[in-house]
């Protein structure tokens, strides 16, 4: 390895292009690996912006050829959870055995999946608390507050050092588990947002949607307490306070809640992007993870289970424009069998 680690970002979409593209502006040695459509867009430069008027055009090398991973000192994985298995096969086939992999994917289980598929390799866990929206070909906008958290490691220390002060800043932490669960709590909104068919702002402005989210969060918080896991604060507020805050009337929530997270009017959850692109969502790794946790503890998670059911139905062609009150009654007062 030279002084500057070579970083290969595998899965260059919203997160890969924004994070990899931003790191490249700092002088970090980054190559993006992704699909041909994205390669064509990136050839003209990636136009990257954030809510604080940060703006850069970045020209990281972009390839569709996974064999470039052979030269990498670090692989940063930014494919959807549904692509983890295929990506692991490519990493196993091309990257050197000693090259660590950093998963920046949502959910708490992708690192374990990678450990199982790539035995012996160092797998690092990270999470991206902020949203990135596409603003047209090659244009990526950081649309909510936050910075990246990741395991402590010398290679990530180099990234931390270079990326400080940028919108893709990375903080190294000693224990990712509480952070990953703190992030998963926020991601329980992905299903509500995707099922609403609205932007995050439009959705979160309506109390019945927030009631659904608050119920999914409460259910998860109770299970985490039983499991002895204390989720960390990843967003603007401590996890235990969020459900009460979400339950406030619109007139109180709207002026404070939407501003706290700096939610851009265009921001939608990544699950809404999946619906829009006709791709399978990551529901199994989000609300589905809560259902599995409940099963391991001998309990139930009816709110999250119902959201999983509705998302699966939407993926199969069912309803994906639920008005707020309809979604609240479908999830919180489901019809008795
Ligand atoms: N979008 C967001 O705002 C946020 C997303 N996240 C998380 O980050 C992760 C990435 O999400 P996001 O960036 O939105 O996803 P995207 O779908 O935008 O980006 C992933 C890209 O990687 C491509 N890809 C998949 N597999 C491979 C492969 N083996 N080789 C090359 N390219 C591949 C995909 O193509 P194709 O579609 O053809 O498979 C897609 O273009 C997810 O876990 C998500 O939950 C976290 C925080 C916020
Ligand atoms: C940033 C956040 C929580 C926004 O919904 C997200 O992780 C996603 O869209 O998947």
Image (tube, grey):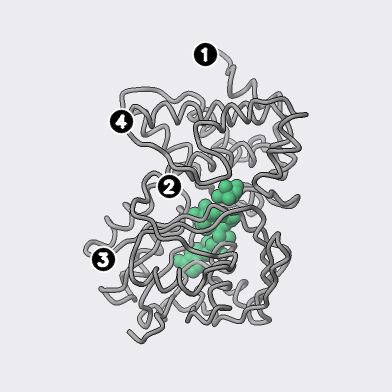
Which image quadrant is residue 320 in? top right
Q: CA distance from mark 2 to mark 1?
A: 38 Å
Q: Which residue is mark 1?
A: 337
Q: Residue at 67% of width from left, 78% of height from top?
A: 57
Q: Is the N terminus in the top left, top right, bottom left or bottom right quadrant?
A: bottom left
Mark 2 nearby-residue class (10 Å; few <14, some 14–19, many ≥20): many
Q: Is mark 3 within 8 Å of ligand 1?
A: no
Q: Is residue 137 left or right of residue 157?
A: right
Counting residues from the start of the chain, the first of labels 2 and 1 encountered is 2
The mark closer to the camera, 4 or 2, is 2
Q: Are marks 4 and 2 in contact (CB under 8 Å)?
A: no
Residue 197 vertical placement versus 323 (above, below): below
Q: Position of residue 26 (x, y in %)?
A: 55, 78
Q: Are marks 2 and 1 in contact (CB under 8 Å)?
A: no
Q: Are marks 3 and 2 in contact (CB under 8 Å)?
A: no
Disc marking residue 296? 4
Counting residues from the start of the chain, the first of labels 1 and 3 encountered is 3
Q: Which residue is mark 2?
A: 179
Q: Is mark 2 within 8 Å of ligand 2?
A: no
Disc marking residue 121? 3
Q: Are marks 4 and 1 in contact (CB under 8 Å)?
A: no
Q: Residue at 48% of width from left, 23% of height from top?
A: 302
Q: CA distance from mark 4 to mark 2?
A: 21 Å
Secondary structure under badge 2? helix
């Amino acid at each position: 390895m030279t002084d500057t680690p070579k970083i290969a970002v595998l899965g260059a979409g919203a997160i890969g292009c924004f994070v990899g593209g931003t790191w490249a502006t700092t002088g970090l040695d980054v190559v993006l690996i992704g699909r041909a459509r994205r390669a064509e867009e990136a050839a003209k430069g990636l136009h990257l912006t954030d809510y604080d008027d940060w703006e850069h055009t970045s020209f990281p090398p972009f390839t569709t050829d996974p064999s470039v991973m052979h030269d990498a000192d670090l692989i940063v994985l930014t494919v959807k959870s549904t692509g983890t298995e295929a990506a692991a096969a490519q990493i196993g086939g091309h990257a050197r055995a000693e090259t660590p992999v950093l998963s920046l994917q949502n959910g708490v289980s992708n690192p374990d999946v990678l450990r199982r598929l790539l035995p012996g390799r160092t797998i690092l866990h990270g999470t991206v608390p902020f949203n990135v929206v596409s603003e047209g070909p090659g244009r990526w906008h950081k649309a909510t507050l936050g910075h990246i958290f990741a395991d402590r490691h010398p290679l990530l220390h180099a990234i931390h050092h270079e990326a400080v002060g940028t919108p893709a800043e990375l903080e190294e932490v000693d224990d990712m588990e509480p952070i990953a669960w703190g992030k998963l709590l926020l991601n329980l909104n992905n299903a509500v947002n995707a099922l609403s068919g609205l932007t995050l702002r439009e959705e979160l402005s309506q109390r019945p949607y927030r009631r659904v989210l608050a119920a999914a969060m409460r259910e998860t918080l109770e299970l985490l307490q039983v499991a002895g896991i204390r989720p960390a604060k990843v967003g603007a507020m401590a996890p235990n306070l969020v459900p009460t805050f979400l339950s406030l009337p619109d007139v109180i929530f709207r002026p404070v809640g939407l501003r706290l997270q700096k939610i851009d009017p265009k921001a939608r959850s990544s699950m809404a992007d999946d619906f829009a692109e006709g791709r399978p969502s990551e529901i199994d790794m989000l609300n589905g993870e809560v259902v599995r946790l409940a099963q391991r503890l001998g309990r139930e998670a009816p709110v999250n289970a119902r959201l999983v059911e509705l998302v699966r139905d939407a993926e199969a062609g069912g309803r994906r424009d639920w008005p707020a009150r309809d979604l609240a009654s479908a999830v919180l007062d489901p019809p008795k069998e």
